[in-house]
Image (cartoon, grey):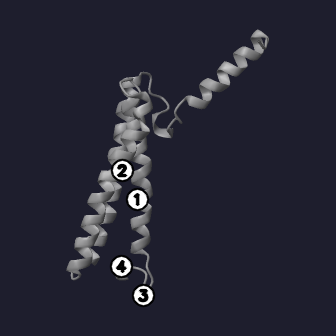
Amino acid sequence: MVKIGWVRAALLAGAVEAAVMPVARAGCDAEATQLEANDCAAREFKAADAALNAVYRQIVARLSSETEARQLLTAAQRAWVVFRDAECKFSASGVQGGSIQPMIFSMCQTDVTKARTEALRRYLDCKEGDLSCPVPAR
């Protein structure tokens, strides 16, 4: 059996704890309780979802005369929502039943939603003549 000093053991325990702690969010750092942190993370997701919906509506507006493309976008977005929720359930499954689970789930939803928003924004920046872009340029 390997013996290590109590100082090394304490440092190792601190490093392990830091490695498994969730990354703090800038807007939620001051939250004092887990319930407050959960609520803050849920608010961050709600804001990210609102931003996503705004970009989605812009694309739908540009596709107003493109019925098939609009239907494909709708189908893709619905499938993406199912993916996001399944991904985040998996992401938070390691803390299932714990008080931190809602925060982990919301943080995942926020991150995945922000990534989707950026992907959709790229469609709004397509250049005229870009045949790989399904959204017409302005």
Q: Label 3 is placed on what type of residue?
A: Glu
Locate residue 57, reporting x and y percent.
27, 66
Q: Where is residue 131 in the image (x, y as percent from the top left)?
A: 42, 86
- Quadrant in the rendering for residue 115: bottom left
Q: Which of marks 3 and 4 is nearer the N terminus?
A: 3
Q: What residue type is labelled 1?
A: Arg
Answer with mark 2 or mark 3, whichever residue precedes in sequence: 2
In terms of image quadrants, where is residue 28?
top left
**Residue found 40% across the figure and 59% down from its top:** 116
Along the horizontal axis of the image, is 2 left or right of 79? right
Report whether 17 appears left or right of 63.
right
Q: Residue 128 carries which label?
A: 3
CB within 8 Å, label 1 to label 2: yes
Name the disc covering residue 116, or none. Answer: 1
Q: Residue 134 carries which label?
A: 4
The disc labelled 4 sits on which kind of residue?
Pro
Which of the two discs, 4 and 2, labels the residue nearer the N terminus? 2
Q: Dot 4, how many residues are within 10 Å of its Cα: few (below 14), some (14-19), or many (20+)?
A: some
Q: Nearer the viewer, mark 1 or mark 3?
A: 1
Q: In the image, is residue 39 above or below residue 5?
A: below
Q: Which residue is drawn at 43% across and 39% down?
A: 91
